[in-house]
Image (tube, rainbow, N blue to C red):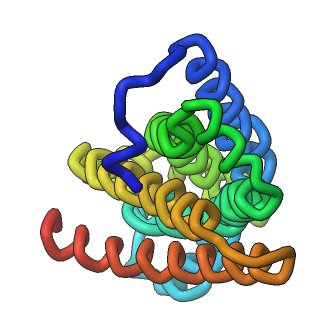
Amino acid sequence: MLAGSFRKPENRKVYWKEFIEQCYDFGIRSLPIVIIISFFLGAVLTIQTAYQLVAPFVPKPVIAQINRDSTILELSPTVICIVLAGVVGSKIASELGNMRVSEQIDALEIMGINTRAYLIMPKIIAAVIIVPCLITISIAVSIFGGYIAGSFSSIITEEEFRQGLRLEFIPYNLFFAMVKSFAFALVISIIPSYYGYYVKGGALEIGRASTTSVVVSCILILLFDYVLSILLL
């Protein structure tokens, strides 16, 4: 499927339009849920970290440091991509499955269009570009959520939180987060495309394919998370 997806496009203008639509689906439509989840992840992480580190010998800036590192290394890339696998992945699988069942894909192939390149390639490229951008936004919003939660609950002052954000910062962690986001973006786009493109049957099979694609995508995201952590950390 992937080999057929990256052949030379017949009409680049049509492919460009499809690519922009997929970027809109991955980015703009997913942005509200990403912001909401990221904000409350950061807020809860700050409160729970403060709850577990209540001790006079533990400096409060450590709370912000833990919030920063946990968000960059694990929470934003993994949790947000699992959410995207459910939101975007199910949409991709059901969309392609509906096109297969209603014979729209067969009609495109009769017209001489490479359906794998036309339907799947823009999704993969859009995911690889947009998902890392969403993860970057998620990291910033999550840290901001922790900042707001710490300030309003008087757990940590604004100056202590800023100090903790600068404490022993390792730029490599951001590189690691981006590598994970690229890998997860491939999973989110390829797995649902496969299950949707090759679905057989009717509406019941479309639902099953959509559910299966989400389950498999989540398992692969967690597996890749483990493998990349071993290889890169």
Q: Would you say 46 lies left or right of 164 here?
A: right
In-front residue for pair 66/34: 34
Of residue 187 and residue 68, the one placed in the foreground of this image is 187
Q: Is residue 164 visible?
A: no
Q: Is residue 16 visible?
A: yes
Residue 102, percent from left and from top: 82, 57
Where does the N terminus fall, quadrant-wise?
bottom left
Extreme-front residue of the structure = 110
Residue 47, image x and y in percent?
66, 74
Q: In this view, does 94 lie above or below 12?
A: below
* Residue occupying the point 59% across, 82% down: 215
Q: Which residue is drawn at 24% across and 68% down?
A: 228
Give residue 91's position: percent from left, percent from top: 74, 58
Q: In which quarter of the image is the C terminus?
A: bottom left
Q: What is the residue that sits farthest to the right in this orientation? A: 203
Q: How many marks?
A: 0
Extreme residue toward the top, this view = 13
Most foreground residue, 42 or 225: 225
| Picture quadrant where residue 128 is located | top left
Q: Residue at x 52, y 48 (%)?
A: 135
Quarter residue 54 falls in = bottom right
Is residue 95 rendered to the left or right of residue 182? right
Residue 119, compared with residue 208, is above or below; it is: above
User: Residue drawn at (76%, 73%), measured in percent from left and top?
Assistant: 206
Looking at the rendering, which quadrant does residue 42 occupy? bottom right
Where is residue 2 shown, x and y percent of the image? 37, 51
